[in-house]
Amino acid sequence: MPDDVTRQTVQLSVDEEGLLRAIAEPLGLSIEPIGSRSVDPTVLLFLVGAPTLVTLALERFHDRRQGGQVIDLRPGAPSVVYRDRGVVYGLVVVLTADGQVRVEVKETADHLADIAGQVVKVVTNAASKELDALADAVRQVSGTAVDVTVHHGAVPAGPADAAKPPQP
């Protein structure tokens, strides 16, 4: 490699690369893409999150299908602790040594709904940031010619909605 060649690796967006090329070419400099790419966090979330949610949903279905818990303390019982499909999931039936029956409710935490809610929250936040960036770009290009408003969450009622009859 000649002594007058300097190499520097930088990470650029497509727009930044175009700008850099426009500056470099009149100066006789060359730009060489090296093809390095990173994984978008949203894509990574879907690649990891979707199989995790499916696995949790299947485990939850299988667990609920097994029924409730039975603890049999009677003498001669074939098993002391077992699951019974005849007992509703979340119930614990205790058969005591003296023949009494106690039923207890043991609610388990539903982590599947919590995880699904967090996934929706992350995706919504990522989409929200993308919309904000798009709105900023439109504002920069259009100046005051266009009024750009981004609504996060529910879209407020506008004049077009006033003409529609209310939905039952």
Image (cartoon, rainbow, N blue to C red):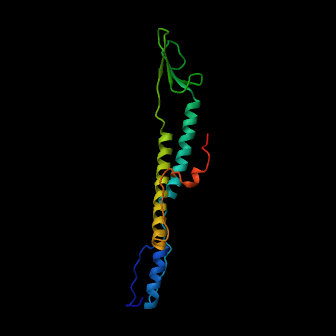
Residue 55 % position (x, y):
55, 43
x and y, in percent, of residue 108 in the image:
47, 31
Q: Residue lying furthest top in this view?
A: 98
- Residue drawn at 47 percent across, 13 percent down: 96
Which quadrant, please, contains the N terminus?
A: bottom left
Report whether 67 appears left or right of 20.
right
Across and down, in percent, residue 133 comes to 46, 65
The residue depicted at 49 percent of the width and 51 percent of the height is 153
* Placement of the C terminus among the 4 image quadrants: top right
Image check: 62 left or right of 22? right
**Number of residue marks:** 0
Q: Residue at x 56, y 27 (%)?
A: 67
Using the image, determine if residue 145 lies above or below residue 73.
below
Viewer-proximal residue among 88 and 98: 88
- Residue 18 point in image, percent of width and height: 49, 79
User: Vertically, is 45 above or below 39?
Assistant: above
Front-lying residue, 109 or 134? 134
